[in-house]
């Protein structure tokens, strides 16, 4: 399942995948894979992403449909 919440939060902060990746110390490809739903990030990476985007884990990674 695609992570549109992450992509929307990143775009709202006017960050490219590359910029977010540098902030959280991963590759741009990793951010792309998370957004496309092809990679399940570790909890520590999720927390870093949330801090970088000023969001909570629930904001970005909780799916209320499941």
Image: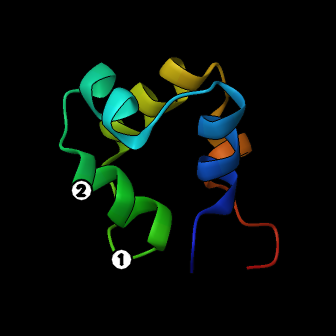
Of 37 and 41, nearer the camera is: 37
Q: Position of residue 6 (x, y in %)?
A: 60, 48
Helix, strand or loop at disc 1? loop
Which residue corresponds to the image point at 73% horizontal and 79% vertical from the top-left? 66
Looking at the rendered structure, which numbered label has been put on residue 58? Answer: none
- Of the 4 image quadrants, the one containing the N terminus is bottom right
Marks counted in the figure total 2
Of 7 and 48, nearer the camera is: 7
Q: CA distance from mark 2 to mark 1?
A: 11 Å
Of 1 and 62, nearer the camera is: 1
Q: Is residue 20 left or right of residue 15?
A: left
Q: Position of residue 20 (x, y in %)?
A: 39, 30
- The colour style of the image is rainbow
Q: Is residue 21 left or right of residue 55?
A: left
Q: Is residue 11 above or below residue 30?
A: above
Instruction: Tell us which disc is closer to us: 2 or 1.
Output: 2
Q: Position of residue 15 (x, y in %)?
A: 52, 29
Mark 1 surroundings: few (<14), some (14-19) or many (≥20) residues within 10 A: few
Question: Which of the 4 image quarters holds residue 27?
Answer: top left
Question: Which of the 4 image quarters holds residue 30?
Answer: bottom left
Which residue corresponds to the image point at 69% horizontal and 53% vertical from the top-left? 5
Of 62 and 23, nearer the camera is: 23
Q: Position of residue 23 (x, y in %)?
A: 32, 20
Q: Is residue 40 above or below residue 65?
A: above
Q: Give the mark nearer the N terminus: 2 vs 1.
A: 2
Q: Is residue 5 above or below residue 66?
A: above
Mark 2 surroundings: few (<14), some (14-19) or many (≥20) residues within 10 A: few
Helix, strand or loop at disc 2? helix
Q: Which residue is mark 1?
A: 38
Q: Which residue is mark 2?
A: 29
């Amino acid at each position: 399942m695609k992570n549109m919440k992450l992509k929307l939060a990143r775009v709202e902060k006017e960050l490219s995948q590359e910029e977010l990746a540098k902030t959280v110390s991963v590759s741009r490809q990793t951010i792309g894979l998370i957004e496309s739903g092809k990679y399940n990030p570790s909890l520590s990476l999720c927390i870093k992403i949330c801090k970088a985007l000023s969001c909570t884990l629930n904001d970005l990674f909780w799916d209320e449909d499941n």
